Amino acid sequence: MSLIELRSVTKTFRSTSEDVTPIQELDFDVEQGTFVVLMGPSGSGKTTLLHLLAGIDRPTQGTVRIAGEEISALSPSQLARWRTRAVGYVFQQYNLIPVLTAFENVEVPLLLLRLSRQERERKIATALAAVGLTDRAHHLPRQLSGGQQQRVAIARAIVADPVVVLADEPTGNLDRQAATRTMELLRRLVDEFGKTLVMVTHDPVTARSADRIVHLDKGRITTGAPSHA
């Protein structure tokens, strides 16, 4: 059984002028411990698919199942609890809180869990060490480079040991050197920590780090070959 299973998923956004359907009758599977990249033109459904996997959006029809849990059937409160423990999300814009240190930004997801202060501190230290930022723990975002800020965001995404890590254009605001370091880190999450990673990118160089590249067009999968095939 795949870790991620989508079956006959359609997502339609209703509006008074014209309905938009970025995902149509989609079947999609991801095996545990693999790195999958989603590519395609603007409007092809990449980010909508990522939002469906994160439980941010619900399918109009079809089922979304992750680690045996049919998240498309959960109530809003159940979905919020599931998202807290099961999903780590990395944004293009980092989305760090500017008045909090790196340590405090990474701590934010843990505040939603029933953990002692000692447990929180241990998890934060582990996450910052994993991204190579132990020595920047008490720096504010403005005191960090763009690449370092994205590494803090990755630490925040993995600190609660999620089932799946989702990344939306995580190198989009970085120069090539910082982007390369970020991709090396994301690759390590899969190879060394056994994470399952689904990432959206427009960059074919960045996409080479993946085990599999899935191309979307008008809400449908056109190819899904291994990246090195």
Image (spheres, rainbow, N blue to C red):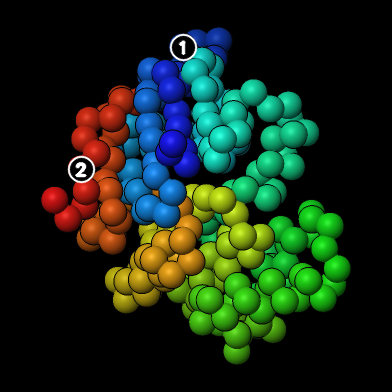
Give above or below for 121 relative to 87. below
Of residues 78 and 203, the one nearer the viewer is 78
Where in the figure is residue 189, as x and y percent of width and height? 45, 65
Where in the figure is residue 88, as x and y percent of width and height? 58, 54
Residue 59 shows in this picture: yes
Give neighbour class at mark 1: few <14, some 14-19, many 20+ (Cα, 10 Å): few
Report the residue that reaches farthest toward the left.
229
Residue 92 shows in this picture: no
Q: Is residue 67 left or right of residue 36?
A: right
Where in the figure is residue 124, as x and y percent of width and height? 68, 73
Measure the C-alpha gap from mark 1 to mark 2: 34 Å
Kind of residue at disc 1: Glu
Task: Name the residue beneath numbered marker 1.
Answer: 18
Of residues 127 and 102, the one nearer the viewer is 127
Residue depicted at 72% across the width and 39% down the height: 80
Give neighbour class at mark 2: few <14, some 14-19, many 20+ (Cα, 10 Å): few
Report the residue that reaches farthest toward the bottom.
135
Q: Is residue 224 left or right of residue 175?
A: left
Nearer mark to the viewer, of 1 and 2: 2
Kind of residue at disc 2: Ala
Give above or below for 163 relative to 159. above
Q: Is mark 1 on a helix, strand or loop?
A: loop
Report the residue that reaches farthest toward the front.
1
Q: Is mark 2 on a helix, strand or loop?
A: loop
Residue depicted at 56% across the width and 51% down the height: 163
Give above or below for 7 relative to 225. above
Residue depicted at 21% across the width and 35% down the height: 223
Give above or below for 207 relative to 131. above
Locate the N terminus by quadrant: top left
Return the mark for residue 225.
2
Return the mark for residue 78.
none
Where in the figure is residue 192, as x and y percent of width and height? 43, 70
